[in-house]
Amino acid sequence: PLYGSGEFSQAFCRSAAVHGATQLLRRKPVQLQTTKDKEGIVTGVVLAGSEDKRKTIPCKHVVLSSGALQIQSKPKQRLLRRISILSHPLRVAENNKNRKKKNDNHQQDPQRHIIIIPPNSPSCNNNTHAIHGLVLDHTVRVVPN
């Protein structure tokens, strides 16, 4: 990602638009309409509004976040964010170790990593949620060199 992790969603939206997708913002989906048979193929999305102002949009494919259709109220959750600035690379590649021995003025390999720690991992005691991490270096132009 040249300009940060927001590029992933932007790239998806642009690619979808090129292929004829429509994106709708600030209207919550409340129901998916499907065919009555066993396959349950999506035929439309019902958007929020008062009972007489609900709008149905016909479609063949739908992309939603995992909690978009949950109508029951959720228990309060906390979202913790952290930004860390590291004084050294998170991981040194084997070819960098060899280069370092030969020449002290070597170029570091790009440091771009996605880290996912699943829930209930042995390394994180009593953690019931996934932990997502993104490591970026100066080559993505969102952090200083």
Image (spheres, helix red, strand yellow):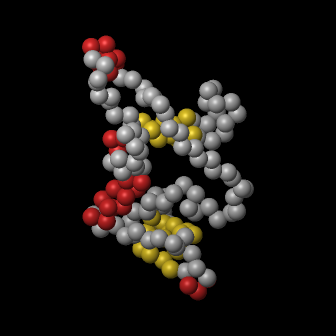
Viewer-nearest residue: 65 or 98: 98
Viewer-nearest residue: 52 or 106: 106
Q: Position of residue 104 (x, y in %)?
A: 31, 19
The image quarter containing residue 89 is top left
User: Residue placed at 51% from the left, 67% from the top?
Assistant: 32
In the rendered image, the vertical position of residue 120 relative to residue 58, given as above or below: above
Q: Residue furthest top?
A: 101
Viewer-nearest residue: 53 or 88: 88
Q: Position of residue 11 (x, y in %)?
A: 34, 56
User: Residue placed at 37% from the left, 70% from the top?
Assistant: 22
Viewer-nearest residue: 76 or 92: 92
Q: Position of residue 113 (x, y in %)?
A: 42, 36
In the rendered image, the vertical position of residue 73 relative to residue 47, given as above or below: above
How many numbered discs? Answer: 0
The image quarter containing residue 111 is top left
Q: Is residue 50 left or right of residue 24?
A: right
